């Protein structure tokens, strides 16, 4: 990356964006590892039905995972926000 | 095809700057102009040289970020398009092009082809808005607007604020830009109550920023990527005169 930080520097801007993308990718992997079930677009090989469909675990994972930044180089902190379904209830689906 | 580019390089606002010659080789006619510049920049970065800085965002002719002169014409040789909409099929092997930033006192050069267009933002902040009490949005069709007026307002609203008009004007006037906003808002009932105040405030800000005055040359209309007509400048002057004479 060329140029200085004290001046208008588009290379620095682009490098910053790449750094952001990498950070986000790492967070998404961490989040996927934390969710020990398969659910919708999130599929874990080790959590599947005999037909190969997503094996849900709504008892333990009916929540939204919000990750809080703890500082550079530190692991983010997880905050779970529970979900309540009243009329349309989660159920096992088959996409066959 | 291969092209020779002479590009204005300027390290920062206090650097005198100069034209530098670059060879763009292996350019495909399917590339857009900015894509070609990206490829030239990749070559520079590989050699450890600072890439050419230029503004861009949407790369589809609607955001108003991109813009520089190609052979002295803002946004290049095609009418009614921005630079990002220009493709290399309009050039041929061996062409030699001169790329320069927008030149106007009110647009100081930040670096290479990037200029500071904050002056435009300050003109809009001075009056390019309508003041309405918001809360829940009212039903849009509750105010009938004649179709002809809506059409003219939309034509003026098409302005993307790129600054090509200023760059091409020998006087460096922002009349087309300011006129477009005044025409757009002034033609609609929501903009009517503040027409006078708006005209004075925006025209005064325009002069404060260091833009020149309109002498009916018309380069602005010729090069506007949204093909806005100089009629909007007549509207600017009419509203300003009305406001000045009625003492608002």
Image: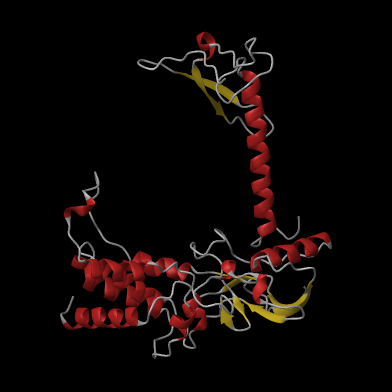
Whole-percent x and y of residue A68? 56, 28
Please state if B229 lies on the left or on the right of B246 as rendered: right
Q: Residue at x 48, y 63 (%)?
A: B62
Whole-percent x and y of residue B36? 70, 66
Q: Tell me, what colour scheme is on the image? A: secondary structure
| Residue A5 appears in the figure | no
Whole-percent x and y of residue B170? 49, 88
Q: Residue at x 27, y 61 (%)?
A: B130
In the foreground, B211 or B239: B239
Location of the N terminus of chain B by quadrant is bottom right
| Residue B86 appears in the figure | yes
Location of the C terminus of chain B by quadrant is bottom left
Q: From this viewpoint, which residue is outermost toward the right?
A: B47
Q: Which residue is drawn at 43% across and 90% down?
A: B217
In the foreground, B62 or B51: B62
Q: In which quarter of the image is residue B238?
A: bottom left
Q: From this viewpoint, which residue is outermost toward the front?
A: A96
Please state if B138 lies on the left or on the right of B221 as rendered: left
Whole-percent x and y of residue B209? 43, 76
In the foreground, B246 or B189: B189
Q: Residue at x 21, y 78 (%)?
A: B243
In the foreground, B46 or B213: B46
Q: In which quarter of the image is residue B153?
A: bottom left
Please state if B157 lies on the left or on the right of B44 as rendered: left
């Amino acid at each position: 990356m060329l140029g200085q930080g004290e001046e208008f520097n588009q290379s620095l801007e682009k490098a910053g964006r790449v750094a952001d993308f990498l950070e986000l990718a790492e967070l998404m992997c961490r989040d996927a590892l934390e969710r020990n079930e398969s659910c919708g677009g999130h599929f874990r090989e080790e959590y599947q039905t005999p037909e190969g469909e997503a094996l849900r675990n709504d008892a333990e994972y009916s929540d939204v995972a919000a990750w809080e930044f703890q500082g550079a180089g530190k692991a983010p902190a997880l905050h779970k926000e529970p979900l309540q379904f009243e009329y349309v209830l989660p159920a096992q689906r088959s996409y066959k | 095809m291969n092209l020779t580019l002479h590009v204005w390089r300027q390290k920062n606002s206090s650097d005198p700057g100069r034209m530098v010659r670059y060879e763009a080789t292996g350019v495909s006619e399917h590339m857009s102009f900015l894509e070609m510049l990206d490829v030239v920049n990749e070559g520079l970065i590989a050699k450890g040289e600072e890439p050419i800085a230029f503004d861009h965002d949407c790369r589809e002719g609607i955001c108003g970020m991109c813009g520089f002169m190609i052979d002295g014409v803002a946004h290049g040789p095609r009418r009614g398009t921005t630079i990002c909409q220009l493709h290399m099929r309009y050039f041929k092997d061996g062409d030699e092009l001169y790329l320069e930033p927008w030149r106007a006192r009110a647009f100081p050069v930040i670096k290479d082809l990037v200029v500071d267009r904050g002056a435009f933002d300050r003109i809009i902040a001075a009056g390019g808005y309508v003041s309405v009490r918001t809360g829940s949005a009212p039903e849009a069709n509750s105010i009938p607007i004649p179709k002809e007026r809506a059409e003219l307002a939309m034509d003026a609203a098409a302005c993307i604020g790129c600054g090509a008009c200023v760059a091409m004007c020998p006087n460096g006037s922002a009349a087309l830009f300011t006129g477009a906003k005044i025409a757009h808002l002034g033609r609609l009932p929501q903009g009517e109550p503040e027409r006078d105040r708006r005209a004075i405030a925006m025209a005064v800000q325009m002069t404060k920023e260091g833009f020149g005055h309109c002498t009916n040359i018309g380069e602005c209309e010729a090069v506007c990527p949204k093909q806005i007509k100089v009629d909007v400048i007549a509207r600017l002057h009419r509203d300003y005169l009305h406001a000045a004479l009625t003492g608002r």
